Image (cartoon, helix red, strand yellow):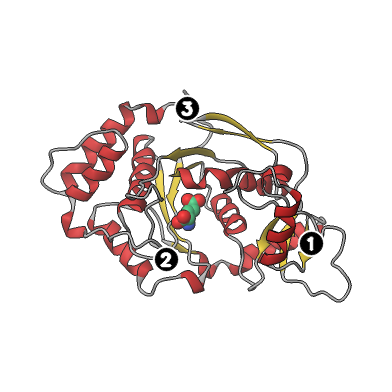
Amino acid sequence: MSRPEPYVGRFAPSPTGPLHAGSLVAALASHLDARAHRGRWLLRIEDLDPPREARGASAAIIDALARLGFAHDGEIVFQSTRDAAYRAAFDRLLAAGHVYPCACTRREVADSALRGALDRPRNAELVYPGTCRHGMPAGREARAWRVRVDAAPIEWRDRRAGASTERLDESVGDFVVRRADGLWAYQLAVVVDDAWQGVTDVVRGEDLRDSTARQVHLQRLLDLPTPRYLHVPVVLDAHGEKLSKQTGAAPIDPHEGVRALNAALAFLGLGEVGAEGPAAFWPEAIARWARSPWMDGG
Ligand code: GLU
């Protein structure tokens, strides 16, 4: 099949802790997919949330990836250096009337969302009820900035799971692009950077599937292309929770080398490679990915 543009993929970890068995799966899947498509693979550190950042985590992630033989193309991009780009995107949304200031506290949103939607599943994300959509109540000050959503369904495709349709007015409501603490929201930054870096294929954990419709909405408002998406399963802990840095997942010991890589490969259903070191692991792992159903639709 001919491809209109060369493949560009990326791994975009948030430095909230070191690389662990869960984030390694996302890193591996995105890297294998890029190499199997003879594409580029970029590394972007999503350090736009200093309060949630763990000291030394960026360096630890970069070091662990290098030792495991992940070779990224180009310079590593740090989102902490990209403020001007996020501001420009925000200003564009503002000028077009797509964003508005919101005075609601988290508590107020939670209270009204619960009152308004008793029939929603218990763990569903709270839907912003639109309190400040037509102006903030008198005497209140702006906290966060939200982007308007409407009832038009957002349609997008996952390479593996297929077509998906989401009505953002029902699932999340107008959502935050600039947080009350003045930081840019992940949803805005990820869209700006994926486009700026020319990313054609986003391969990441299934936990981010729920964010995709919001990202597609922002891409459309900002006239940015929508990449192809592939979401891979996430590693769960003994309690069925996503393995994460926040729940204290053990860091990958890069000296473990192939053992850690093989565990991630097996998790993706591609078995283990009998290799002594990372250098011998990669060609076989890429070949297996290229023959696997993960390549379908890509
Ligand atoms: N920074 C996000 C995370 O570590 C991933 C962003 C993405 O892949 O879209 O969860």
Of marks 2 and 3, the one in the foreground: 2
Q: Position of residue 110 (x, y in %)?
A: 68, 59
Q: Position of residue 289 (x, y in %)?
A: 31, 33
| Residue named by callout 2 | 16
Asked if the beta carbon under badge 3 is closer than 8 A to the nearest atom of ligand 1, the reply is no
Secondary structure, mark 2, is: loop
Number of on-image labels? 3
Q: Earlier in the sequence, mark 3 or mark 1?
A: 1
C-alpha span from label 3 to label 1: 38 Å
Residue at the outermost left position: 276
Few, some or many residues within 10 Å of mark 1 (<14, 14–19, 20+) = many
| Residue named by callout 1 | 100
| Residue named by callout 3 | 297
Q: Quadrant of residue 67?
A: bottom left
Quick check: 41 left or right of 175? Answer: left
Quick check: 27 left or right of 124? Answer: left
Q: Amino acid at mark 2?
A: Thr
Secondary structure, mark 3, is: loop
Of marks 3 and 1, the one in the foreground: 1
Q: Residue at x 44, y 49 (%)?
A: 10
Q: Residue at x 61, y 50 (%)?
A: 125
